[in-house]
Structure formats: structure tokens, C-alpha cells
Image (cartoon, rainbow, N blue to C red):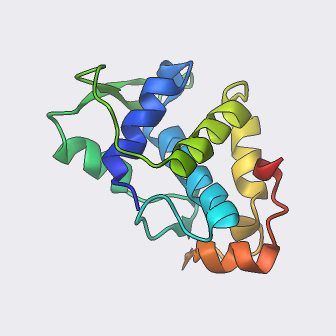
Amino acid sequence: MAELHDVMAYLIQNYPATHELSNARLTKMVYLADWRQAISQGKQITPIQWYFDNFGPFVRDVETTAAFRDDLFSVDLGSNMYGQPKKSFSLRDPSYRPTLSASEKAALDHIIEVTKRLYWNDFIKLVYSTHPIASSERYSYLDLVKKASEYGGRDKIVA
């Protein structure tokens, strides 16, 4: 299982529009990668215990990791297009090399490829269309490995 800071660093380094990587989007990209890995490998990439709240799969792990690893991440505060506060992250050291397996990188690369052209509304539709969200009650923890076994690997993000 990878360290969350390595997953975050990899996404920040490889996502073509880093200005779009708000805390919410980065968190949901980690969720999608965990879901992809659960389907293809029977395990998550990260140790995150995902929770389905009002805003889909959302946990504080990404922002907590960025704050804790201030040697690696810079926290950037700004506003989104609606004037609401927006927190995003950048790498302090662009030459940092995350420690990830080939299958973890493949899952992350797939998520980058699938989401890089999606504006926020379409991105959120994708997240909400995943089996763990579509088949679970709000305010519950998501067992992605169990959900992947249930679903049989036919999720949209696998295509």
C-alpha cells in the first residue's frame, strides 16, 4: 500500500492542469484511483477509510497530509470561479520521486487520463456514478474492495 503523500505528489506532478487540483478534486481523484485499484487488484492504493458524506467520497486525509508534510507540499489559498475559498496544493520540490508500484502508477495514470478533460460538473457526475457511491447510503463508510467484488469490475472508470 502506498503512502498518501506519494499518491498526492504523483497526481500533482502528472496532472496537466494543476490549477484545477483543488482539495476536493484531488481528494476525489485519490478516491477514483483507490476504486480503480480495488477493481483491478483487489486492494486500495491508499489506507484511506472512505466516507460518503454530503459531498460524495470526502475525507480530510489529503489536506491533513499536505499540512503535515509541509516539507513536501505548499498549501495555496485562493477562490474558485464562484468566489468561494479554494485550497490547492503544489510540490515544494518538483524533482521529488514518489515511491509507487507499477500497478499503482497505472491506476493513477488511468484516472488522470479519464478526468483531465472533465470540467467540475462532469467530473462530479463520474465520481457519483461509481458503484460505491451509487449503491451506498450517505453518511456511511465505503468498503471499496467489497464493493469491487460485488460489482465485478464493470465500472465506468475501468473502460
x then y, percent, for residue 120: 67, 33
Residue at left 69%, top 44%? 124
Let me know if residue 46 appears in the view.
yes
Residue at left 69%, top 76%? 147
For the residue pair 44 and 141, the one nearer the viewer reads as 44
x then y, percent, for residue 76: 30, 25
Say which quadrant the N terminus sits in: bottom left
Quadrant in the picture for residue 95? top left
For the residue pair 109 and 85, the one nearer the viewer reads as 109
For the residue pair 16 and 134, the one nearer the viewer reads as 16
Q: Is residue 71 above or below residue 99?
A: above
Residue at left 43%, top 25%? 13
Q: Is residue 65 left or right of residue 147?
A: left
Residue at left 79%, top 65%? 153
Q: Is residue 5 left or right of residue 36?
A: left
- Total numbered circles: 0
The residue at the far front in this view is: 102
Q: Is residue 89 left or right of residue 147?
A: left
Q: Is residue 95 above or below residue 59?
A: above
For the residue pair 35 and 128, the one nearer the viewer reads as 35
Quadrant in the picture for residue 139? bottom right
x then y, percent, for residue 72: 21, 33
Let me know if residue 136 appears in the view.
no
x then y, percent, for residue 98: 34, 38
Q: Is residue 74 above or below residue 135?
A: above
